[in-house]
Structure formats: structure tokens, C-alpha cells
Image: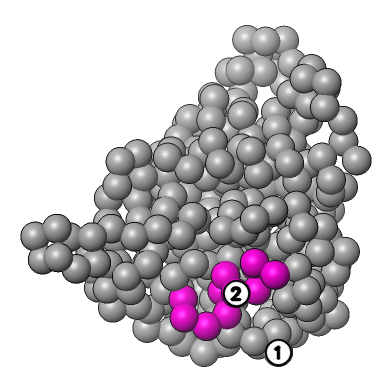
Amino acid sequence: MNVSTAVEIAGLRLKNPVMTASGTVGFGEEYAPYLDLSRLGALVIKTVTLRPRPGNPPPRIAETPAGVLNAVGLQNPGVEVLVRDVLPRLERFDVPVIVSIAGETVEEYARLAARLDGLPGIAALEVNISCPNVKAGGMAFGTDPEAAAAVIAGVRENTGFPVIAKLSPNVTDIRAIALAAAGAGADALSLINTLSGMVIDVERRRPLLGNVIGGLSGPAIRPVAVRAVWQVYQVVDRPLIGMGGIMTARDALEFILAGARAVAVGTGNLVSPETAEKVIAGLTDYLQAHGVADINELVGAAHRTGGATRC
């Protein structure tokens, strides 16, 4: 049986719904020897800021039960290096490139959007308003509807690219943030970023991470992420990109059935560089085994069978 895995996100036609989560494959080139980037639906590269960032002090990574706590702190060489050196090298890969951006102020987000606007090799911008392990900006914008709307509006006014708002789970009600971002001009929503957490070294009797607080990712957070997608799908009429602990095709299908049109593999890339490719292959196998001709038929299907309705 011939099946289709192609999806559309904010005007982007993707060969399949599987992306990488920002910050987990660097700028993509680092994984090219181990992962066929051309097989991805899209490549979301690590978050870039207006100026270079050294990141947080080490230790930056701590393994936890069924997950990873990270406090990298958005280390990156800055937008000018991205434009001059990175984007031209990524053109050799047959994959849409989504650039993740972050700033400490609304103005910085707007300036980043303006600097990147119209550049070749960019398919969309992901607006990171949800990083829990930076001191300024980051999650502060993603936990308040008005602040989130201000950032998205600033980006929207300065770019013709599709705008994807990346949402934080560290809120009382993620639906309020989703509605604010969509109302301000986000073309799609990406959820969720990491959960805020920490680990204490009991021998040294002090926090293990140099930043004290980090972001928890991996299979441990998947039920939280699926719940968030389920809730946002019911109230926002925008394409959703689901992420949080996807290790297998069945994990990805949970998000799709909950309402995600695409998914992103994050921590799975750290476990095995081939994870995304295995998820892609597994989705095709599932469609064939269950007689589903088009993966879009599954988007939000759990709502239809469960009696829930979409706004």
C-alpha cells in the first residue's frame, strides 16, 4: 500500500512530519556523518542570538531517570556567524532549515527577525520564548500572555518567513500563552520546551548543575507534552509541532493523534543519532499496517474518537 507522510506547516510542505528539536543536533552539520539530514521533514538548528553567548558554567548536563537535565544556556556564535558561515554550508542538504531565535528583549527578537528576513536557505523562524535556563529573556517571555504576544508581534512585523512560537510548559495554563501567540501572528506553535528542574549532588551537598536550574527533557516529560498538545489543539486553530520524549514512532503517534501535525525529536538524538530516521520509518510502517493512506488523517484523531471537540 502506498502511503503519504507529507504534511504542511504554515505554508511549508514537508516530506514527512519529523523534525529535530532545536539545540539537540547543533547546526546540523555535526550530525551529518551519522544522520541523513535529507530524510528529515525539517532541520531545526540550535537557537541563535543577536550576539555570541558563551553559555552557562559547567556542569551543564545531568542524567535523570528517563530523562536529561540540561543547562547549556543557549551557547552560540551569534547571528552574524550563522549568516556568514553556517547557512551557506547547510544549503547542500536537501532539507528545509528552521532557524530558532532568542533575545533578552522584544527589540532583540525583532532585530534578529529583520536580520534574517529573506535570506536564502531559511524556511521559517522558531521563536524561542521558553528556555528555562537563561538569566534574561527566555522563559520570562513564555510565561506571560502579554509578553509572549509582544515578542511574536515584534518578530511578525519584521519577517516574511513563517513564524513558529515555541511554548513553555512551566505555566499554569499553556492554552492562554498559545492563544496570545496565535493572536499576535504566530503561524504555528511548537510545544513543549523543557520542564524546569534541578539535581542536588548529595556528596558535595550542592546543586549539580553550574546554573543550578536546568531544563528536563526525555521520556519522563512525554505525558506532560502530549497533554499540552491535546489542550492547545482544542482552542487554537494553528498547526502544532509536538515534542517531548519522542524515542519511537509510537511516541510520535501519540502527539499526532493528540493534534500535532508535525513532531520534533530532541533527547532521542543524544541517545542515538539515528532516532529521527527510525521514527520516520516507523510512521510509514504504521500507516501501511493500519491501512491509512495519508498521515494527515491521524492528526487529532484521538479527539474525534474520544468525544472531544476542537474550537
x 61%, y 37%: residue: 226
Mark 2: secondary structure: helix
Residue 254 is left or right of residue 152, and the answer is left
When the figure is inspected, residue 304 is found, relative to residue 155, above or below; the finding is: above
x 49%, y 67%: residue: 132
Q: In the rendered structure, which amino acid carries the disc numbered 1?
A: Glu
Q: Nearer the viewer, residue 127 or 194?
A: 194
Question: Over which residues does the magenta segment extend?
Answer: 134-144
Which quadrant would the C terminus be assigned to in this image?
top right
Residue 256, image x, y percentages: 68, 33
Asked if the stretch drawn in magenta spans residue 239, the answer is no
Mark 1: secondary structure: helix
Q: Quadrant of residue 212?
A: bottom left
Q: Is residue 217 visible?
A: yes
Residue at image mark 2: 140
When the figure is inspected, residue 65 is found, relative to residue 135, above or below; the finding is: above
Which quadrant would the N terminus be assigned to in this image?
top right
Q: Which mark is residue 107?
A: 1
